[in-house]
C-alpha cells in the first residue's frame, strides 16, 4: 500500500508538471515575449524619455534595486554591473535631491572604485555593447561632475574605439546589432532606424535616447509617437507593469519560442504525447517564419546564427525538410557567429551550430574541435557572451559533442559538475543552488544517460539533482537570478520556466 501511494503521488506530480508545461508552451512568443525589467534600460528611459507624469514609481523601483555593496545589477555577473550602476547614478542625480538619493549615489561611486579587477583583461563574455556603452556613460558621468576613474577601463575604451570606427563607417538600417546600442553612438535620429516593433534596435535604452534626440524635430512627430508606444508596450511585458520600468531587449518573440522548443528537444520532450496539441502549432509557426537566411530573435531583427541553429534542430526533429544552408552563412573560420563582424565569439552559439549540423548529418568536425579547444583545464566551459552560468555553457557543449572521440573531455566536464554539486543535489553559483542552474546539469547528464555513456558516479549525481528539482518545484516561482546577458543581466521568464520544467519532469518518456 505504501508503494502504491508513492506511485500515485509521483503520477500526480507529473500531471501538475505537464499542465504547467502545456500552459507555458502555449504562451510562448505571445505579445512579443516576456523579459525581466532592466536596471540599465529603466535608468536610461528615466533620463531620456520618462513616462509623462509618472516618474516616481519607476525611480523608486530603480532605487530599490541597489545592492548593499552600493552597486546595481546581480553580483553573480560582476562585469554586467558597471553599466547598470553608472546609468542608475545618472538617473538618480537627475531627479533625486533628497538625502537618500545622495547617499545612494555616493555608495554607487564607492562600489565602482572596487570594480577595477574585473576589467584588467577582456574575455569573450563581455555584456552586449559594453565597449560602446561604458565609455559613453563615463563621459556623461564626468560631464555631470561625478568622479569615476577611467584608467581601469582603458582596455575596454580601446576596444570601444575600434568598434565605434567600424560603426561610424556607414548608416545602419533598423533591426541590426549596431542600432541595438544606438544610445552609445547615435547623434542624428532617422525615421528609418525604427523597426516594425516601433522601437529602435529592440532596445528600450536606444529608443529612449532616439526619442530625446528627436524631440526638437517636428518632421519625426509620427515616429516619436510610435517609439513612445513601443516603450509602453515593452513596460507591459516585464511582469510588474510599472510605467517606465522596461526590459532591455524586446520583443524577443522567436528567441523565447525557439530556445524553449530547443530545450524541449534536448530533453526528448518535443514529441511527448501530452504536449502535441500545444507544441505542434508552435513548431508550425516557426516553420512559417523560418527563411532561407535563417531566423532572428523577432520578426523585425536580422537573422542570427544562434536562433537559426536551434530552429534547425527543432524543425528537423519535427520532420520538416530543412538544410544547413542558412546556418552556413554564419560560419566564420573555425567557428560560427551570432552576427557577422562580432569581436567576441560565443561558445554556446558554436555548440548549437555543431548540434544542428550533427542532427542534419552534416560534417561538424571544425566546430567540435573549436569547442574542445575552448575547454578549461579543469573540465569546465566558461566565458559565454549570452549566458553567464558556466553550467549552461558546459551542458550545451556536452550535448553538442559526440561522445567518441570526445569521451575524455566530456567525462572531465561531468566530473566538474559533480564536484560543484551541493550535498542536497542542487547546483548553483553566487546565489547557491538554483533551479535554473541545476536544470542545466540535469539536461546535460540525461543526454549522456540516454546515449548509454554516463558513468556510475554521474548516474548517482543525476539522481540527486533530479530529486532536488522535484523537491524545489514551485508552480508560481517569481524571484530567481538573472543569468542571461544583453547589455546587463536579464531573465526571460517563460524560457527559464520551460528549462526548469523540462528538467523537473521525470525522464520516462
Image (cartoon, helix red, strand yellow):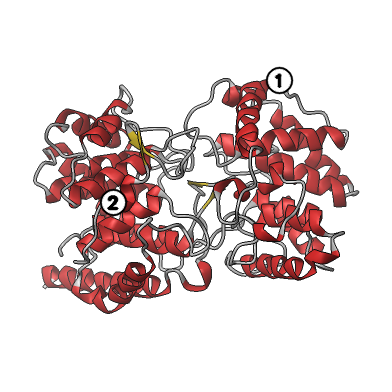
Residue 176 in percent (x, y) is at 55, 51
Disc 1 target residue: 151
Residue 486 in percent (x, y) is at 54, 47
Q: Residue at x 78, y 64 (%)?
A: 220
Q: Secondary structure at mark 2?
A: helix
Q: Residue at x 53, y 38 (%)?
A: 77
Residue 467 in percent (x, y) is at 26, 54
Q: Residue at x 15, y 49 (%)?
A: 361
Residue 15 lies, with reference to residue 313, above or below; the image says below
Q: Residue at x 70, y 33 (%)?
A: 135
* CA neighbours of label 1 inside 10 A, class few (<14), some (14 to 19), many (20+): few
Identify which residue, 300 or 482, lies in the foreground.
300
| Pointer 2 or 1: first along the chain | 1
Disc 2 target residue: 325
Query: Closer to the camera: disc 2 or disc 1?
Result: 2
Residue 473 figure quarter: bottom left
Quarter in which the C terminus is drawn: bottom left
Residue 327 lies, with reference to residue 336, above or below; the image says below
* Residue 312 relative to residue 134: left or right: left
Amino acid at each position: 500500500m505504501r508503494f502504491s501511494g508513492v506511485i500515485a503521488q509521483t503520477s500526480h506530480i507529473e500531471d501538475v508538471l505537464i499542465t504547467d508545461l502545456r500552459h507555458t508552451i502555449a504562451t510562448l512568443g505571445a505579445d512579443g515575449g516576456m523579459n525581466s525589467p532592466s536596471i540599465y534600460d529603466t535608468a536610461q528611459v528615466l533620463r531620456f524619455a520618462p513616462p509623462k507624469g509618472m516618474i516616481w514609481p519607476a525611480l523608486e523601483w530603480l532605487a530599490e534595486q541597489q545592492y548593499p555593496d552600493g552597486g546595481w545589477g546581480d553580483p553573480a555577473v560582476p562585469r554586467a554591473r558597471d553599466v547598470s550602476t553608472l546609468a542608475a547614478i545618472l538617473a538618480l542625480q537627475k531627479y533625486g535631491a533628497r538625502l537618500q538619493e545622495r547617499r545612494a549615489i555616493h555608495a554607487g561611486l564607492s562600489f565602482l572604485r572596487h570594480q577595477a579587477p574585473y576589467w584588467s583583461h577582456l574575455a569573450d563574455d563581455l555584456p552586449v555593447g559594453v565597449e560602446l556603452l561604458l565609455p559613453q556613460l563615463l563621459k556623461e558621468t564626468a560631464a555631470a561632475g561625478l568622479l569615476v576613474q577611467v584608467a581601469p577601463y582603458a582596455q575596454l575604451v580601446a576596444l570601444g574605439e575600434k568598434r565605434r570606427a567600424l560603426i561610424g563607417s556607414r548608416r545602419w538600417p533598423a533591426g541590426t546589432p549596431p542600432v541595438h546600442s544606438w544610445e552609445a553612438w547615435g547623434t542624428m535620429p532617422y525615421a528609418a532606424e525604427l523597426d516594425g516593433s516601433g522601437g529602435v534596435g529592440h532596445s528600450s535604452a536606444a529608443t529612449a535616447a532616439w526619442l530625446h534626440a528627436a524631440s526638437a524635430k517636428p518632421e519625426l512627430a509620427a515616429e516619436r509617437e510610435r517609439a513612445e508606444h513601443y516603450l509602453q508596450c515593452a513596460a507591459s511585458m516585464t511582469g510588474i507593469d510599472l510605467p517606465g520600468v522596461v526590459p532591455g531587449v524586446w520583443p524577443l518573440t522567436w528567441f523565447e519560442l525557439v530556445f524553449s522548443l530547443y530545450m524541449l528537444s534536448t530533453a526528448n520532450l518535443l514529441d511527448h504525447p501530452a504536449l502535441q496539441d500545444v507544441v505542434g502549432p508552435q513548431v508550425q509557426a516557426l516553420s512559417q517564419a523560418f527563411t532561407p537566411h535563417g531566423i532572428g530573435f523577432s520578426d523585425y531583427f536580422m537573422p542570427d546564427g544562434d536562433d537559426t541553429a536551434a530552429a534547425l534542430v527543432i524543425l528537423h526533429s519535427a520532420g520538416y525538410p530543412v538544410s544547413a544552408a542558412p546556418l552556413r552563412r554564419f560560419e566564420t573560420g573555425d567557428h560560427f557567429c551570432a552576427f557577422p563582424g562580432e569581436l567576441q565569439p560565443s561558445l554556446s552559439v558554436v555548440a548549437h551550430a555543431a548540434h544542428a549540423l550533427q542532427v542534419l548529418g552534416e560534417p561538424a568536425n571544425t566546430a567540435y574541435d573549436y569547442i574542445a579547444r575552448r575547454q578549461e583545464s579543469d573540465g569546465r566551459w566558461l566565458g559565454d557572451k549570452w549566458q553567464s552560468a558556466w553550467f549552461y555553457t558546459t551542458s550545451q557543449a556536452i550535448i553538442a559533442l559526440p561522445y567518441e572521440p570526445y569521451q575524455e573531455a566530456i567525462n572531465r566536464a561531468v566530473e566538474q559538475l559533480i564536484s560543484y554539486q551541493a550535498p542536497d543535489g542542487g547546483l548553483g553559483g553566487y546565489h547557491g543552488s538554483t533551479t535554473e542552474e541545476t536544470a542545466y546539469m540535469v539536461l546535460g547528464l540525461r543526454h549522456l544517460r540516454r546515449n548509454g555513456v554516463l558513468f556510475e558516479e554521474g548516474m548517482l549525481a543525476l539522481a540527486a539533482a533530479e530529486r532536488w528539482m522535484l523537491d524545489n518545484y514551485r508552480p508560481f516561482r517569481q524571484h530567481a537570478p538573472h543569468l542571461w546577458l544583453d547589455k546587463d543581466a536579464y531573465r526571460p521568464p517563460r524560457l527559464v520556466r520551460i528549462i526548469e520544467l523540462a528538467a523537473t519532469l521525470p525522464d520516462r518518456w
